[in-house]
Image (cartoon, helix red, strand yellow):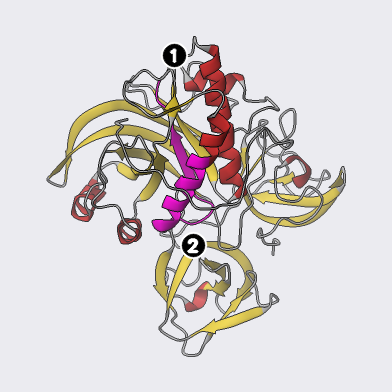
Amino acid sequence: MTLGISSLTSALIVGTVNAPAVAEPETPVSYPSGASATRTSGLGFDTCTAPSRSALRAWRQSPYSTVNVYIGGINRACRQPELSRSWVRDVTAMGWDLLPTYVGRQPYCVNARGMSTFTKSDAYRLGRTNAQHAIGKAEELGMARGSALYADIEHYDRSDRDCATAVRRYVSAWTSTLHANGYLAGVYLHHASGLQDLSTSYGSAHYARPDAIWLARWDRDTSLRGWPNTADSKWSVHQRAKQYRGEHKTTNGGVTLNIDSNSIDAPVATVARRYRVTSSVSLNARTGPGTSYGATGGHAPGSTLSVICQARGAKAGSTSVWDLLADGTWVSDGYVSTPSNTGFSRALPRCKWPGQVSSTGPLNARSGPGTSHARSGSPLPSGSLAWIVCQKRGTRIDGTSVWNKLADGRWVTDHYVSTRSATSWSSPIPRCP
């Protein structure tokens, strides 16, 4: 990672974090309507300055599918002449996934000079302020709620235990503030400092646990398992990325970039894609994915829609696929110019609302919404993300009969998942059809 200077401003955003919250370490994400998480897997790269559209167009033939972008922070190194809302929209339309990183305050024992820092006493306040600023930058760039934003924490001297405590406090405030505003929290860490300290406090009730970690270890090994200083059971369900090679020049499509290389299986930015209404009459927008949900208005034929993701709902015409729009309403995909009008489109992510598993031990997943259904696959470790696609009534477990259907088709009781409600439905997650 390369670092530098930028200005720091912050909007008034909900979520005050002056001390640890009672819900820690699994603070629930308050997803608003129009929010959805996006995850990706494969190889990615990062450069100090966001590449031009033409460079990224040429690099579509590369082995990389994700590009990191430095969205802000007082210690961000490079100017970003390309980075804008239209750039984000255009490169997403090309097929790139984006990994947003914020280079904010660094621990006072950081192994670098001239950086703006935080201490043990102001870590909560600055972690909250940096998260608020990052949210503002993400919104300016068109990154929807549900996106994962990554705090850059550079290598530091972890023999200074007050400094290690400061890091935990900063990351906890960063995480809680992002969660309160509908974003997932990620952290970029060095394998010999930040990873070790956050792994040690993984189950601590004093600190909010981030949703994903991005490890820096330049050993050219792309594996997301077998890392030093943390167990494979921690951040284990689509929650890891690794920067496995430092700066090097690479050419694709005749364009050379100076990059770091990454292996990724983790949440990234959610960005709306534009499509047109193809119906000959006004297309109803509804409060959920089905005609049984109330209509909230209509979209004229030929008008442009901002589609966040797709989900399965009640069949309408030739398809049961519904599109979630940026305003939080739903339309039937059969009347939208997505690549497929009968099934899911590869260009669009499936809608997901992940929450951290809050059980003290591994959580059993089942083939259906209840304990009468057989156990299915490996249990979800404590702290892992349950990637929820919808909810349904099932066996009552300790005060709730709500069960979560996961993106892989399995089911877990909502009682042991950190969603907005511990006893009932959690908006905006839809009911399973």
- Seen in the picture, residue 320 relative to 335 is either above or below; the reply is above
User: Label 2 belongs to which residue?
Assistant: 308
In the rendered image, the quadrant that contains the C terminus is: bottom right
Secondary element under disc 2, as helix, strand or loop, is: strand
In the image, taking residue 278 as reference, residue 421 lies left or right, namely right
User: Label 1 belongs to which residue?
Assistant: 157
- Residue 340 placed where, x, y %? 44, 69
Which residues lie in the magenta part?
129-155
Judge whether residue 238 can be spotted in this image. Answer: no
Residue located farthest toward the top when viewing the structure as drawn = 159
Within 10 Å of disc 2 (Cα), the crowding (few <14, some 14-19, many 20+) is: many
Q: Earlier in the sequence, mark 2 or mark 1?
A: 1
Within 10 Å of disc 1 (Cα), the crowding (few <14, some 14-19, many 20+) is: some
Residue 43 on the magenta segment: no
Q: Callout 1, which amino acid?
A: Asp
Q: Residue at x 32, y 30 (%)?
A: 1
Q: Residue at x 65, y 60 (%)?
A: 428
Residue 257 or residue 346, whichever sits in front: 257
